[in-house]
């Protein structure tokens, strides 16, 4: 069974940085779309950053210029670099991969979530 294991969350002061990692438990044969979502208490889950197989990226307006989504094919891992963090970035962050992991069947996978807390 394929798992996406997230790490890198934690408590950071405003203005600080964190890098979230999302490691697949099996070999990633292809990523069609990769994304990071977040959900703050009492709010709906929202898309923060997305990347496609043709290297296009898209960011929520609230994080443009501060967050960067990337991947390391050699490590079967997707990253979210978060700089200049603000208290409103506080949320549980989830990674999402639409692709072929450990199989050539295309499926959608979710990570378990990692808490990011930004203090003012």
Image: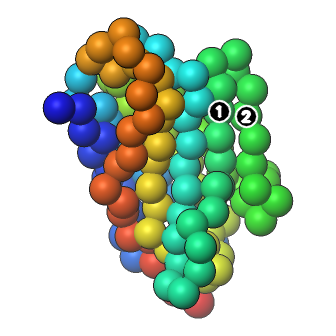
Look at the picture and state if 66 lies above or below 27.
Answer: below
Residue on which disc 1 sits: 51
Q: Percent x, y for residue 115?
A: 38, 70
**Extreme left residue here?**
1
For the point 35% across and 49% down, the residue is 111
**Quadrant where the image shows the N terminus:** top left
Q: Dot 1, how many residues are within 10 Å of its Cα: few (below 14), some (14-19), or many (20+)?
A: many
Q: Dot 2, how many residues are within 10 Å of its Cα: few (below 14), some (14-19), or many (20+)?
A: some
Whichever of callouts 1 and 2 sits on the residue coming sooner in the sequence is 1
For the point 45% across and 55% down, the residue is 94
- Hey, which quadrant is residue 29 in on the image? top left
Q: Which mark is residue 79?
A: none
For the point 58% across and 89% down, the residue is 120
Task: Kindly tell me whether residue 66 is visible in this rendering.
Answer: yes
Q: How many marks?
A: 2
Pointers 1 and 2 in contact (CB under 8 A)?
Answer: yes
Pick the residue in front: 74 or 114.
114
Secondary element type, mark 1: strand
Determine whether, in the image, residue 13 is placed left or right of residue 59. left
Colouring scheme, one of rainbow, by chain, secondary structure, one colour: rainbow
Residue on which disc 2 sits: 57
Pick the residue in front: 10 or 1.
1
- C-alpha distance separating marks 1 and 2: 4 Å
Task: Kindly tell me whether residue 28 is visible in this rendering.
Answer: no
């Amino acid at each position: 069974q394929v798992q996406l294991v997230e790490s890198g969350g934690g408590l950071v002061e405003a203005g600080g940085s964190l890098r979230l990692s999302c490691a697949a438990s099996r070999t990633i044969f292809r990523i069609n779309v990769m994304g990071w979502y977040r959900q703050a208490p009492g709010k709906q889950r929202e898309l923060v950053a997305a990347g496609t197989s043709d290297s296009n990226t898209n960011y929520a307006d609230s994080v443009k210029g501060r967050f960067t989504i990337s991947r390391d094919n050699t490590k079967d891992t997707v990253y979210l670099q978060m700089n200049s963090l603000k208290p409103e970035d506080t949320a549980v962050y989830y990674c999402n991969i639409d692709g072929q992991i450990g199989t050539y069947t295309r499926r959608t996978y979710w990570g378990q979530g990692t808490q990011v807390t930004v203090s003012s």
